[in-house]
Image: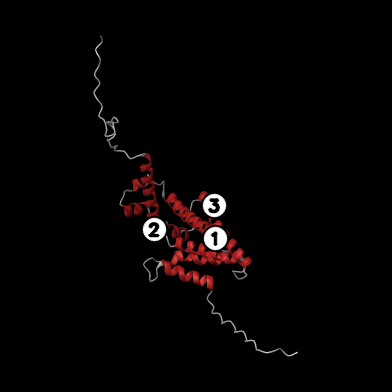
């Protein structure tokens, strides 16, 4: 009779299942999803820091060495996340535009009449232009972006303009907005709100909320005082003369 081979017994878990010897081995490499998330987080840090520095110093006055120094990394490290400074600028401006378009669309989807939607869109736009990517969108001109991408950015900017025009036109039709040329009014609104991104300083006398509140009030209410509405004469009692 052939001799049977003895197989070493496998350890059995608390519920009677055989334990896997490799189950408790921790891999020194992160899971692919974890690595991708870490890379994206670091890339966003590069873009956010770059946007802040472009806003502070200007695009041409900011170098990759400056960005790397603020992040406490070496310049070669940056090349793992971006190709060059032009790509950084393009992504910063693109992020600002996407934030604006997404915010405007969400405001419109929230419902309400045209004036309610216009007010919400103005609020969103103003809030974005005081953030790093939105401010970069305003402070850095299209001419700084490489030509192939310049057309894309201008197309996206035109979508913002058209969104304001449509809401103004709807408000005029509804009677909630005074008669005006929607194109000119959209230019006035976007221009005034965009300029906040140029002159606003986070360490200034007013908070971003205070600045936005006052600017929206001026744009929506105007600057002229309005005379009180005349009182209607009280009706006299008695019969009217024949």
Q: Earlier in the sequence, mark 1 or mark 2?
A: 2
Q: Which mark is residue 149?
A: none
Q: Say which residue label 1 marks.
A: 111
Picture coordinates of residue 63, whole percent (x, y): 38, 53
Q: Give 117 or 225, whichever is nearer the viewer.
A: 117
Residue visible at 32% across and 55% down? 70
Tag 3 and tag 2, C-beta contact below 8 Å: no
Q: Residues within 10 Å of mark 2 (few under 14, many from 20)?
A: some
Picture coordinates of residue 66, whole percent (x, y): 35, 54
Residue visible at 56% across and 80% down? 226
Q: Say which residue label 2 marks.
A: 52
Q: Say which residue label 3 marks.
A: 151
Q: Residues within 10 Å of mark 1 (few under 14, many from 20)?
A: few
- Locate residue 112: give its quadrant: bottom right
Camera sees residue 58: no
Residue lying furthest right in this view?
242
In the image, 218: left or right of 201? Answer: right
Camera sees residue 137: yes
Tag 3 and tag 1, C-beta contact below 8 Å: no
Q: Is residue 116 above or below residue 12?
A: below
Distance (Cα) linking label 3 and label 1: 31 Å
Distance (Cα) linking label 1 and label 2: 34 Å
Q: In what element is the residue under mark 3?
A: helix
In the image, 165: left or right of 60? Answer: right
Q: In what element is the residue under mark 1?
A: loop
- Locate residue 1: give its quadrant: top left
Q: Earlier in the sequence, mark 3 or mark 1?
A: 1
């Amino acid at each position: 009779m052939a001799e049977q081979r003895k197989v070493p017994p496998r350890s059995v878990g608390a519920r009677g299942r055989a334990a896997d010897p490799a189950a408790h081995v921790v891999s020194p490499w992160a899971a692919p999803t974890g690595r991708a998330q870490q890379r994206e987080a670091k890339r966003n840090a590069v873009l956010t820091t770059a946007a802040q520095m472009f806003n502070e110093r200007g695009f041409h006055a900011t170098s990759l060495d400056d960005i790397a120094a603020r992040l406490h990394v070496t310049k070669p490290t940056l090349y793992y996340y971006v190709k060059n400074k032009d790509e950084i600028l393009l992504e910063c401006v693109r992020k600002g535009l996407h934030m604006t378009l997404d915010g405007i669309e969400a405001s419109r989807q929230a419902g309400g009449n045209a004036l309610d939607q216009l007010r919400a869109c103005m609020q969103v736009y103003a809030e974005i232009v005081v953030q790093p990517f939105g401010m970069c969108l305003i402070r850095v001109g299209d001419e700084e972006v490489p030509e192939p991408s310049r057309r894309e950015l201008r197309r996206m900017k035109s979508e913002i303009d058209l969104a304001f025009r449509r809401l103004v036109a709807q408000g005029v039709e509804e009677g909630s907005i005074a008669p005006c040329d929607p194109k000119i009014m959209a230019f006035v609104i976007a221009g005034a709100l965009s300029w906040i991104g140029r002159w606003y300083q986070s360490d200034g006398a007013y908070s971003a909320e205070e600045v936005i509140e006052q600017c929206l009030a001026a744009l929506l209410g105007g600057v002229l005082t309005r005379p009180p509405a005349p009182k209607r004469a009280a009706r006299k009692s008695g019969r009217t003369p024949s």
